[in-house]
Amino acid sequence: MVRISLIILALSIAMTGCSGKESSQDISTIRVGLVLSVGGLGDKSFNDSAYKGLIRAEKELKIKPIYGQPEQMAEDEKYLRQYAEQGFDLVIAVGFLMKDALERVAGEFPNSKFAIIDAVVNRPNVASLVFKEHEGSFLVGAIAGLMTETNKVGFVGGMDIPLIHKFEVGYTEGVKYVNPDAVVIVAYAGSGPEAFHDPVRGKSLALSQFDHGVDVIFQAAGSTGNGVIDAAEERGLFAIGVDANQNYMAPGHVLTSMLKRVDVAVYEIIKDVVEGRFRGGIHVYGLEVDGVGYALDEYNRDLLPNSVIERVERIKRDIVAGKIQVTDYTVTH
């Protein structure tokens, strides 16, 4: 009996030691919950870019990541609240569609830290990560205006809302800045969230524009834009990608991509938490910090003459210097 008691005591001490180690590790590990926008991973655009930032943080900052993929907007709040209840060090909402849900959850958990992309939530525990999409769109508009051979270019937006009008207006101003005679044809996929993940609709809209003489289309439409790129490849014409670098999706038929560095914003806000300098409020990402831009790589370098690249780089410098003012639709409307 004494021997058995000693064995039990030894096992108890061993188990206590293991438990203590696990508890210590949990305390020292930063946990980050990322709630993706409806459509989830695989959009080759907005969600994938946010996830890229999360995985980079896992590798470089040694955080413990988890991500949720709501199948419909009604589930957004459930995911946000679940991560907050579990005591995650940071909860990130991907996309403006979660603004109302995050307002409620952040109010219920004032001691938790949150971030949201593409919306402003006026709470001290929420970092609002917003972008100067109009600046990046101006640059790709300039590329379209310089490269068109028909003087007709297109824009296909996802959901018909002010945020996407911000892309449209910046793009149109860029086209007109370098080519005043060019015509910009505009179409939107719809008025609801589904407009961001309907590639069949995107392809149909693009084919219609190509049929009307357009030879370059900029899409700002989530995975709906994948259909625009398919149409460009099918017709032997050009598309311009958005958010992530989509040049690889149809080599020879994607002139460039308007880069919206959601991955950088996600990584940087996680880094702020890790380093103990998180702050609520508005965080802005524009050309001056490479928060937006355009993609140049092995897939499109041969498509763009050096003269075009040099012109666009001059325009970029002038925007940063304030010599060119690009309209921010969300401010003027």
Image: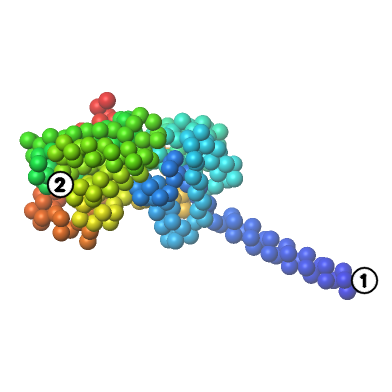
Left or right? Give the position of 307 relative to 18. left
**Of the residues shown, which amino acid type is indicated by label 2?**
Ile
Which numbered marker is on residue 143?
Answer: 2
| Label placed on residue 227 | none
N-terminal label among 2 and 1: 1
Q: Secondary structure at mark 2?
A: helix
Residue at the image point whose x is 52% and y is 37% from the top? 75
As shown in the figure, which amino acid type bears the numbered disc 1?
A: Met
Residue 170 in view here: no
Residue 112 appears in the picture as rendered: yes
Q: How many marks?
A: 2
Residue 235 image point, x, y percent: 20, 47
Query: Which residue is tagged 1?
Result: 1
278 or 65: nearer the eye? Answer: 65
Q: Secondary structure at mark 1?
A: loop
Which residue is depicted at the point 91% across and 72% down? 2
Q: Position of residue 284 (x, y in %)?
A: 32, 41
Q: Quadrant of residue 199?
A: top left
Residue nearer the viewer, 5 or 211: 211
Quadrant into which the C terminus falls:
top left
